[in-house]
């Protein structure tokens, strides 16, 4: 305690002893003591020790303080000087209001993060990396983009194709530049709060959505496929001028119908083609839309099966001089397709689908090269501007080539700026129109009436490059078939096995699903065999029956109820619906009879 005539004074960082002032009145000393106690009352007692610079002062003061600070109120003037008596009291531990980043690192993965698709796998790989010190090579930009395409395909026509037993696709596209299988689910930076984590995640997901350029290439992958190789024979069936004009017409028509569908999705917020029909017209239209999707996908796979069989047959004849009936090759393909149809996780098809796209692009380039060379060498063949006998066959093939409605909704929703989708779609349709017209025109004007349904058969059959393309193109189609048939299988499975227990807990359900998938594969092969005798007629029939209502009737019907406001817009929708119905009935009748 200070000796008589001394008192304390405080500043923000120190407690000092004032020099004795002789003859200072007692009440003045009491006022100084009160001011000291009042100033110290604003500071926690546990912090006073840090204010004393000289430990000697603290030691000397402590000698005069009571040993039991709990009874400080009972001491003289205790109600005023209690804080002074507690100067040397032991500091209590105080809980920090901040969060340590180390705590988040030690805590590991949060349950909400582990529930994300692939969460346990990413966490396991991260643990293995920390334990053993190895790293996985990160996917390249090209691989990431293709995996994104597969992920979008997993939401074909807005339908959720994830199997209840397995994930249809476990690739996370929300942050392709920052997240891979080695990325920890909890970053450990101390920024994860209950409210902020989801907000940050949503912002990051928004940031890493597809750009307009990426959306362009995703749509190009959807539109450019095997259908382009059926166009040269279709030009022969319709005539050069008629086919060019009609292809341009269908490109414009397809653009507006796809645009109508995207507008309906944007206005209602419903991301499923079938659910849009259900909301506007009831369960009937929903069933019709789903049936059209299933019919179209099965028809496409059946046509691809015949196309592949023709190429394999030509390959064996050119290489080994062996010739077998076409159904031998259809059976061979069925034996390959059956086990591949059992794959639930479509990312496992990524390598196969990637190779398929490479082979398809290589095949198209080879066809353009040899057709151009033959045109320069031999000159143009004899062609007709309009073929009145078989022009109706061209309509179905043209629609078949432009069909890609299943990926319109998922690509639009994957974009960072969905408002730019109409521009992207216009660019894609324009490029496809130029490409389709160029391939059809080039091959038809080069080979004339001798053009084959499978145009590869018109190329020099003794060329190593052509023989290689026959094999690799056939292989490409075989590798892409499981991805093409998946939407049809999952749509039917989700309806047939809705009330059954999951295959995870009931092996019987799982094997019933496996048997169903194999059965669909057998049915598709049977349809392919029945249509193999006249492939161009078969492709045209698929285009008319499945694709006309799916592309040119259902979107205007939805647009009429959801978007159209004035009489002009409603009139356009009605005209398109009637035009699609007339084309469906007329072309189907012409093809059958």
Image: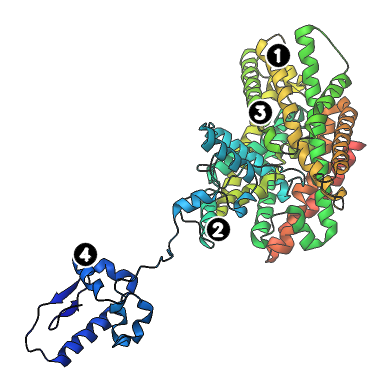
Vertical position of residue 192 compared to residue 136: above or below = below
**Figure quadrant of residue 42:** bottom left
C-alpha distance separating marks 4 and 3: 93 Å
C-alpha distance separating marks 2 and 1: 55 Å
Left or right: where 156 falls relative to 99? right
Mark 2 or 1: in front is: 2
| Mark linked to residue 467 | 1
Q: Are marks 4 and 3 in contact (CB under 8 Å)?
A: no
Mark 1: few, some, or many residues within 10 Å (few <14, many ≥20)?
Answer: many
Of 409 and 177, the residue lying toward us:
177
**In the image, farthest residue toward the left:** 22
Could you say where residue 444 lies in the image, as x and y percent from the top left?
A: 71, 24
**In the image, farthest residue toward the top:** 321
Q: Which residue in the structure is indicated by mark 4?
A: 55
Label 1 residue SS: helix
Image quarter where the N terminus lies is bottom left
Which of the marked residues, 1 or 4, is nearer the chain's N terminus? 4
Which of the marked residues, 2 or 1, is nearer the chain's N terminus? 2
Mark 4 or 2: in front is: 4
C-alpha distance separating marks 1 and 4: 95 Å
Vertical position of residue 23 compared to residue 366: above or below = below
**Figure quadrant of residue 29:** bottom left
């Amino acid at each position: 305690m200070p000796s008589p005539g001394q008192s304390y004074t405080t500043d923000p960082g120190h407690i000092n002893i004032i020099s004795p002032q002789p003859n200072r009145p007692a009440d003045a000393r009491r006022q100084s003591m009160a001011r000291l106690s009042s100033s110290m009352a604003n500071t926690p007692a546990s912090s006073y020790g840090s204010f004393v610079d000289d430990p000697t002062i603290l030691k000397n003061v402590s000698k005069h303080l009571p040993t039991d600070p709990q009874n400080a109120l009972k001491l003289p003037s205790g109600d005023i000087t209690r804080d002074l008596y507690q100067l040397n009291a032991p500091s209590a531990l105080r809980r920090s209001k901040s969060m340590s980043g180390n705590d988040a690192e030690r805590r590991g993965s949060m349950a909400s993060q582990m529930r994300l698709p692939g969460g346990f796998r990413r966490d396991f790989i991260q643990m293995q990396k920390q334990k053993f010190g190895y790293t996985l090579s990160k996917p390249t930009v090209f691989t990431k983009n293709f995996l994104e395409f597969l992920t979008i395909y997993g939401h074909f026509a807005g339908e959720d194709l994830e199997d209840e037993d397995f994930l249809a696709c476990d690739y996370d596209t929300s942050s392709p530049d920052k997240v891979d299988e080695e990325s920890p689910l909890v970053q450990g930076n101390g920024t994860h709060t209950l409210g902020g984590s989801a907000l940050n995640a949503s912002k990051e997901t928004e940031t890493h959505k597809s750009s307009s350029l990426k959306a362009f290439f995703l749509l190009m992958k959807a539109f450019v496929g095997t259908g382009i190789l059926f166009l040269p024979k279709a030009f022969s069936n319709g005539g050069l001028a008629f086919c060019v004009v009609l292809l341009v017409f269908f490109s414009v028509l397809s653009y507006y119908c796809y645009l109508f569908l995207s507008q309906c999705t944007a206005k209602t917020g419903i991301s499923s083609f079938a659910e849009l029909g259900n909301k506007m017209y009831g369960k009937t239209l929903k069933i019709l839309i789903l049936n059209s999707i299933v019919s179209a996908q099965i028809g496409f796979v059946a046509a691809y099966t015949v196309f592949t069989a023709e190429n394999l047959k030509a390959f064996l004849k050119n290489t080994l001089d062996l010739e077998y009936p076409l159904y031998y090759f259809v059976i061979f393909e069925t034996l390959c397709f059956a086990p591949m149809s059992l794959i639930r996780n479509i990312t496992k098809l990524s390598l196969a689908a990637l190779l398929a796209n490479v082979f398809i692009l290589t095949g198209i380039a080879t066809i353009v090269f040899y057709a151009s060379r033959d045109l320069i060498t031999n000159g143009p063949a004899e062609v007709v501007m309009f073929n009145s006998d078989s022009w109706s066959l061209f309509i179905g093939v043209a629609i078949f080539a432009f069909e890609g409605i299943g990926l319109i909704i998922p690509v639009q929703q994957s974009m960072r700026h969905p408002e730019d989708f109409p521009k992207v779609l216009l660019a894609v349709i324009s490029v496809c129109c130029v490409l389709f017209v160029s391939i059809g025109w080039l091959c038809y004007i080069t080979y004339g009436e001798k053009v084959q349904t499978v145009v590869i058969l018109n190329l020099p059959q003794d060329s190593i490059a052509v023989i290689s393309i026959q094999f690799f193109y056939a292989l490409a189609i075989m590798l892409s078939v499981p991805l093409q048939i998946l939407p049809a299988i999952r749509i039917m499975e989700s309806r047939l096995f809705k009330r059954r227990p999951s295959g995870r807990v009931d092996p019987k359900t799982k094997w019933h699903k496996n048997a169903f998938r194999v059965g669909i594969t057998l049915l598709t092969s049977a349809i392919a065999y029945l249509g193999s005798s006249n492939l161009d007629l078969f492709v045209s029939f698929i285009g008319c029956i499945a694709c006309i209502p799916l592309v040119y009737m259902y979107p205007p019907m939805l647009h009429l109820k959801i978007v159209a406001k004035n009489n002009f817009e409603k009139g356009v929708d009605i005209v398109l619906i009637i035009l699609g119905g007339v084309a469906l009935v007329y072309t189907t009748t012409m093809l059958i009879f």
